[in-house]
């Protein structure tokens, strides 16, 4: 399950980041996962709770934004929403479609809480 | 604990060499501290604050992959990353093309599997330098594994390096290793809708090899439909139909590689 290794790497990166900042825990994580990124958000959530056990991210709330895919036709040049890589241009039926967005997979921000008693 | 050396290593990927039972290297990140984040400001709001990171989740892998790519380019090493479902014929195809390619250029191989050195042994039998990466529970190779493996492999300048990824059509597509080209392999015993079911992999690939063509008469597989499906996902995809068993079509692919080597 590839969401597991992704979840582990996110947790590892953010745990290190939060420690560097002297935080006591991470309370929120904002992710952007484009609809074409090849990541199943629900599966990632599931893996995340397992991956975060015993780290500063254990109680973090995961907010996931899922931007739609956008394709650009290589023949007629129009831009249109796509939900698959094998999109067809709605105007001219061309299959020469370039994906211009929807592939992003980004940690947008995290919210950290200071250590108790500071 | 590692059962070969008894060290404290838990899980994680290990490098092995066929025939050398004691040889193994644990891949760790120590000494790889080039991670950085792009911070656009701290908002101190009492005890809780938000850090804007805008960091690509695969940023670390991508950076290391670019370092690998720079190293390969500097030494003029042409690198192919072979990807497929388990059993589509990655190792068999390498067994077929390497003896002929070796006549022209030094070849080396990195094998990725969760367990065993079986595939590395098959490569060693061809007389090429080979290293096995056992990923354990990991289902793909990443740039750090390749970076470590390359240090254990004596690569020649002006050579060809073939990387056989772990059999899996999903996440190996997301992990850049620093290769020049991604080669996706499917076989006629799979479904001809595979490119539609695993679009990310076919979208990322530079060429697609349809293997086991010798079995075509016995299976319900439409090669043209499969090709059309693949082209819908990626209209730049190069396409070859071969049989690693009979050798049918293998020459055309070999010539294509030789051409790429010349241009490289
Ligand atoms: N009939 C036929 N069988 C093939 C062909 N190519 C490979 N095979 C058989 O398919 C099986 C798997 O081949 P491998 O080359 O080991 O496949 P692989 O992709 O390396 O497999 P993993 O490394 O386990 O993912 C073996 O039994 C091969 O003999 C082919 O062109 N025709
Ligand atoms: Mg193999
Ligand atoms: Zn169009
Ligand atoms: Zn060990
Ligand atoms: Zn950066
Ligand atoms: Zn994986």
Image: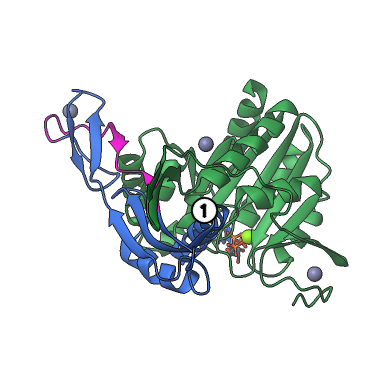
Q: Position of residue A12 (x, y in %)?
A: 54, 60
Q: Is residue B31 left or right of residue A3?
A: right
Q: Is residue B192 left or right of residue A73?
A: right
Q: Is mark 1 within 8 Å of ligand 6?
A: yes
Tally of numbered tags: 1
State whether residue A99 is above or below residue B259: below
State whether residue B196 is above or below residue B233: below
Give the structural element (helix, strand or loop) at label 1.
helix
State whether residue B246 is above or below residue A101: below
Question: Would residue B158 be counted in the magenta stretch?
Answer: no
Quadrant of the image where one finds ligand 2: bottom right
Identify the residue at the far front of this view. Answer: A117
| Residue at (69% x, 56% y) in the render | B111
Q: Position of residue B162 (x, y in %)?
A: 67, 45
Query: Looking at this view, is B157 or B58 the one in front?
Result: B58
Q: Position of residue A90 (x, y in %)?
A: 13, 36
| Residue at (30% x, 43% y) in the render | A102
Span shown in magenta: A90-110
State whether residue B53 is above or below residue A63: above
Query: Looking at this view, is B263 or B39 the one in front?
Result: B39
| Chain under disc 1 | B
Whether residue B168 is visible: no
User: Which residue does the numbered mark 1 point to in the structure image?
Assistant: B172
Q: Position of residue A32 (x, y in %)?
A: 33, 49
Query: Looking at this view, is B233 or A65 the one in front?
Result: A65
Question: Would residue A92 be counted in the magenta stretch?
Answer: yes
Whether residue B71 is visible: yes
Question: Which colour is chain B painted?
Answer: green
Residue B34, image quadrant:
top right
Question: Which colour is chain A painted?
Answer: blue
Q: Badge 1, how many Cα within 10 Å: few under 14, some, many 20+?
A: many
């Amino acid at each position: 399950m590839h969401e597991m290794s992704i979840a582990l790497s996110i947790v590892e990166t953010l745990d290190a980041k939060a420690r560097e900042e002297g935080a006591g825990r991470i309370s929120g994580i904002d992710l952007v996962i484009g609809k074409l990124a090849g990541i199943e958000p629900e599966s990632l959530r599931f893996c995340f709770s397992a991956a975060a056990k015993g780290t500063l991210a254990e109680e973090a709330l995961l907010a996931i934004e899922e931007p739609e895919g956008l394709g650009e036709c290589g023949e007629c040049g129009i831009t249109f929403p796509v939900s698959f890589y094998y999109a067809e241009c709605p105007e001219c039926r061309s299959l020469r479609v370039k994906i211009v967005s929807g592939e992003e997979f980004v940690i947008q921000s995290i919210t950290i809480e200071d250590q108790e008693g500071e | 604990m590692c059962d070969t050396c008894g060290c404290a290593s838990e899980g994680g990927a290990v490098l092995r060499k066929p025939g050398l039972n004691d040889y193994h290297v644990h891949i760790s990140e120590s000494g790889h501290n080039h991670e950085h984040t792009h911070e656009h400001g701290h908002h101190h709001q009492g005890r809780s604050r938000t850090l804007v990171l805008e960091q690509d989740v695969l940023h670390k892998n991508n950076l290391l992959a670019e370092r690998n790519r720079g190293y390969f380019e500097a030494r003029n090493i042409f690198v192919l990353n072979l990807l497929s479902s388990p059993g589509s014929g990655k190792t068999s195809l390498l067994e077929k093309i390497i003896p002929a390619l070796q006549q022209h250029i030094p070849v080396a191989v990195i094998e990725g599997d969760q367990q065993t050195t079986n595939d590395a042994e098959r490569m060693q039998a061809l007389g090429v330098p080979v290293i096995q990466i056992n990923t354990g529970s990991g289902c793909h190779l990443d740039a750090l594994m390749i970076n470590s493996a390359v240090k254990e492999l004596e690569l020649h300048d002006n050579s060809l390096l073939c990387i056989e990824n772990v059999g899996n059509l999903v996440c190996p597509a997301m992990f850049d290793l620093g290769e020049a080209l991604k080669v996706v392999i499917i076989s006629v015993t799979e479904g001809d809708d595979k490119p539609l079911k695993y679009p990310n992999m076919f979208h990322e690939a530079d060429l697609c090899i349809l293997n086991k063509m010798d079995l075509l008469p016995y299976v319900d597989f439409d090669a043209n439909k499969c090709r059309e499906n693949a082209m819908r996902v990626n209209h730049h995809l190069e396409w070859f139909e071969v049989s690693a068993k009979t050798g049918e079509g293998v020459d055309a692919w070999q010539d294509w590689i030789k051409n790429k080597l010349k241009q490289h």
